[in-house]
Image (cartoon, helix red, strand yellow):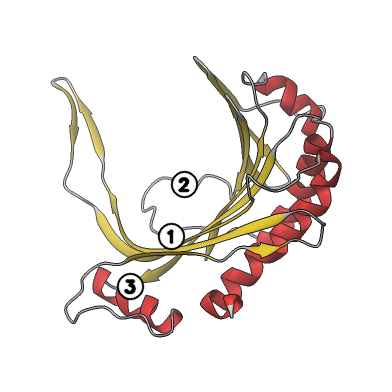
Amino acid sequence: MIQQLQLTVFVPGPPLAVLNVLATVFPGVTPKAFQNQGPQQMATLEIGGFQVTIASQPERIDFVIAPPEPPLPPLSATVELDFREASRLMVPAVGAFASAQANAQRLAVILNAAREVGSTQESVEVARNQIPNLQVPDGTSEIDYKINVPCPSSIDGITLNRLHRWFSAARAVVEFVITHGGPSVAPVQELSWALVEIIDINTTTESKFESRFSLKLFEEMITQAETLYERGYEAFT
């Protein structure tokens, strides 16, 4: 299931003030939380039934959209992101913001997904089913496989990197107990496994990028990311 979608605008120079970015992208929305950690600023907000995080640091602005935060443990019941609704909310707003950045250099769309499995060994089998001709030795317990197949954009002079990574992952739920003697960690409450997929579509550094095409590029990269998630390795062939 898709868990998170990220849109990134690469802008050279010092970090932009994240509250100014928020006011531009989502006017009138008040952040739920704000952090200022040296060269990085971060604002978290809730909008349209989603949790959105805007992070500003030197050279880039990241816009991350995810389902609302899950309730208290158990946390293994991960909530799936409504990818198309999230895209409809984010792409026009972030595309307009990027178009206004005359010195923007690159764009990226990153999709994070996880397919729950019963063990790390099962994650290897799931990966083998998704990636034709993948050769791994018998007894392989984990996998980490990445491929990049660039393709031309519909916009002249632009090439898109299309990265797809599959890797085994385990998630543990632990409980912190506060006592008079100080905090302590209780034994693991729950353990689950997944085959994680990260799909990263971005404009290459060699592309002749013009910010006025940002919205169209984001729409194209969203389509590419969704196609790679749905068709996997076959989308490259």
Please give left or right for residue 125 compared with residue 26 in the image: left
Residue displayed at 82% across by 57% down: 155
Instruction: Name the mark on residue 71.
Output: 2
Q: Amino acid at mark 2?
A: Pro
Considering the numbered disc 1 on the image, is that residue within a helix, a strand or a loop? loop
Question: Relative to the observer, which residue lies in front, 79 or 160?
Answer: 160
Query: In the rendered view, would you say 24 is above or below 82?
Result: above
Identify the residue position indicated by label 1 in the image.
77
Please give left or right for residue 129 compared with residue 230 in the image: left
The reply to whether dot 1 and dot 3 touch (C-beta < 8 Å) is no
Q: Mark 1 or mark 3: which comes first in sequence?
A: 1
Query: In the rendered view, would you say 55 is above or below 144?
Result: above
- Quarter of the image for residue 160 reads bottom right
Q: Mark 2 or mark 1: which comes first in sequence?
A: 2
Crowding around mark 2 (Cα neighbors within 10 Å: few <14, some 14 to 19, many 20+) is few
Q: Is residue 80 visible?
A: no
Considering the numbered disc 2 on the image, is that residue within a helix, a strand or a loop? loop
Question: What separation in Å lies between label 2 and label 3 (alpha carbons)?
Answer: 27 Å
Question: What separation in Å lies between label 1 and label 3 (alpha carbons)?
Answer: 18 Å
Crowding around mark 1 (Cα neighbors within 10 Å: few <14, some 14 to 19, many 20+) is few
Please give left or right for residue 168 compared with residue 150 in the image: left
- Marker count (numbered): 3
Instruction: Name the mark on residue 123.
Output: 3
Percent x, y of residue 140:
20, 74
Q: Amino acid at mark 1?
A: Ala
Query: In the rendered view, would you say 227 is above or below 138?
Result: above
Question: Relative to the observer, which residue lies in front, 147 or 112?
Answer: 147
Considering the numbered disc 3 on the image, is that residue within a helix, a strand or a loop? helix
Between marks 2 and 1 in the image, the one whose residue lies nearer the viewer: 1
- Quarter of the image for residue 23 reads top right
Q: Amino acid at mark 3?
A: Ser
Crowding around mark 3 (Cα neighbors within 10 Å: few <14, some 14 to 19, many 20+) is many
